[in-house]
Amino acid sequence: MFATLSDRLTSTFKNLRSKGRLSEADIDATIREIRRALLDADVAVSVVRDFTGVVRERALSSEVSGALNPAQQVVKIVNEELVNILGGQNRPLQMAKSGPTIIMLAGLQGAGKTTLAGKLALNLKEQGHTPMLVAADLQRPNAVTQLKVVGERAGVPVYAPHPGNQGEDALPGVSAGDPVAVARGGVETAKVRQHSVIIVDTAGRLGVDQELMTQAAEIRDAIEPHEILFVIDAMIGQDAVATAQAFDEGVNFTGVVLSKLDGDARGGAALSVARVTGKPILFASTGEKLQDFEVFHPDRMASRILDMGDILTLIEQAEKAFDAQEAERMAQKVAEGKDFTLADFLIQMQQLRNMGSMKKMLGMLPGMGQMKDALDNFDEREVNRIEAIIQSMTPAERDNPKIINGSRRSRIAKGSGTTVTEINQLLQRFDAAQKMMRQMAKGGGAGVPGMPGMGKLPSAGKRAGARQAKKEKKLTPQQRAAAARKAAREQAEGKQGTSFGMQNSDSVDVSKLELPSGFDKFLGR
């Protein structure tokens, strides 16, 4: 969603990092590039003006001029102001102190309210709540049928006493129905059945009109919801501000939900709605599946925009997808020094696939914006191929890949529908992973001794700066043999030299030397 904006901002800050000191001209040029990047991303002009004004004021203050790394300080300021634009801090849903919590969804037609109702219900169900969906959208054709399907997939009951608009399949004599009465009846039914959360799906229009606002206001007054969530399409562009202001005046919503955040649009709506309306963004829909739904954290979204990654969200998704018992078993196996097998590798790959799109997960890592082309070319089916290859092996081959010879590789390739080359590549990658697991079990790696994942440094355990004794150079067996032969030959010839490279004094005729008078006493004569 924010790929273009992220690339522009990253490029701007890259130019700053090459400068030790920042002049006013450097800061003005940076602010100009940030302004252009935000406007190109369809952020509202008023929001851009306020944002760049605050960033420039802080960048010209002593906060930056006195910093050891001025460029990093500017990036820090932009990150903090992005967080403020996105709402500051995450706000959870306001749950009722007694009785069921009533949540009303409002927004334009096509924003994704019905699908989002199912996603929100599934999310709350996983938290231990007992939600129920109410089909109060009787205007859009087959909206009630869609909500029933979504509810069935989420495992959540749906209150739908009226079929709604059936389009061409509408039965003669069936009235359009009263959405206010349906909403009121849904709340009463949920209370009787003791549901803890009620999610009311309301009708939308293709544009903001008085009829839409009147109906939404009547439903609000009838059910008195604890939360009114405004669902807005993140791909809507500059019109997001006008739409949000109209709904705020009409129904006075309490929070915003961004849908279609996985699209390729510029994403200016996310940076505009929260600042203009003053209402927090609570959730974000990031895909078509019911599981593609996450709590919106302004600080994490700002980190994604600035290509700093989103490790916390990645960890949360991993905790949901990975089996705790399997992780404990694997940790115990590594601690005991047992080898990492292909069967373990297969389990890890399957759990990794349960986390969702690999591209999405890799995109949450810091600096991955610079590898956008590689991410775009990444084949999501690679995990399926690896799974097919390992499942085509026998249990003995999975436990000991060294027995996989040429004929076995050919058999595995035929059974998995791959090539021998792909088998070889997988075994090479697995061998590297196996070595890494062995190193982890030994507490090795690259770093300080005794720390997991850190190897031994050359001077570890010695006083810093201390002068070390010079070690004798090791000789090869051939060099030692040659030195021994030379010493034996010199001993035999009586030519073993002195420390100064001269022959022994016994073999020298002193009388033939022209020495000063009395000097021979120094020669021991």
Image (cartoon, rainbow, N blue to C red):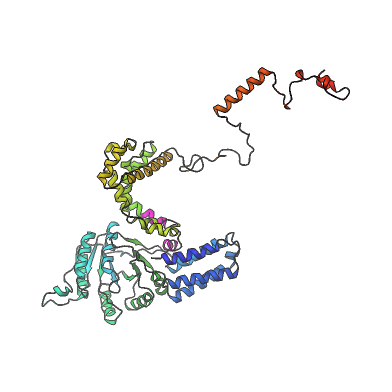
User: Where is residue 141, by image quadrant?
Assistant: bottom left
Residue 204: horizontal and vertical position, in percent? 27, 75
Residue 88: horizontal and vertical position, in percent? 44, 66
Q: Quadrant of the N terminus?
A: bottom left
User: Where is residue 492, by image quadrant?
Assistant: top right
Tell whether 386 sits left or right of 169: right
Say which of 511 and 376 sits in front. Answer: 511
Which is the main secondary structure of the residues drawn in magenta?
A: helix
Task: Say if the magenta span includes residue 501.
Answer: no
Residue 183: horizontal and vertical position, in percent? 22, 72
Look at the image and give the residue range highlighted in magenta.
296-316
| Residue at figure coordinates x 89%, y 23% from the top left | 517
Please say whether residue 519 is visible from this viewpoint.
yes
Judged from this view, the residue extending furthest toward the front is 512
- Residue 312 vs 4, above or below: the answer is above
Residue 372: horizontal and vertical position, in percent? 41, 59
Say which of 461 and 160 sits in front. Answer: 461
Please say whether residue 279 is visible from this viewpoint.
no
User: Where is residue 25, by image quadrant?
Assistant: bottom right
Tell whether 61 sits left or right of 2: right
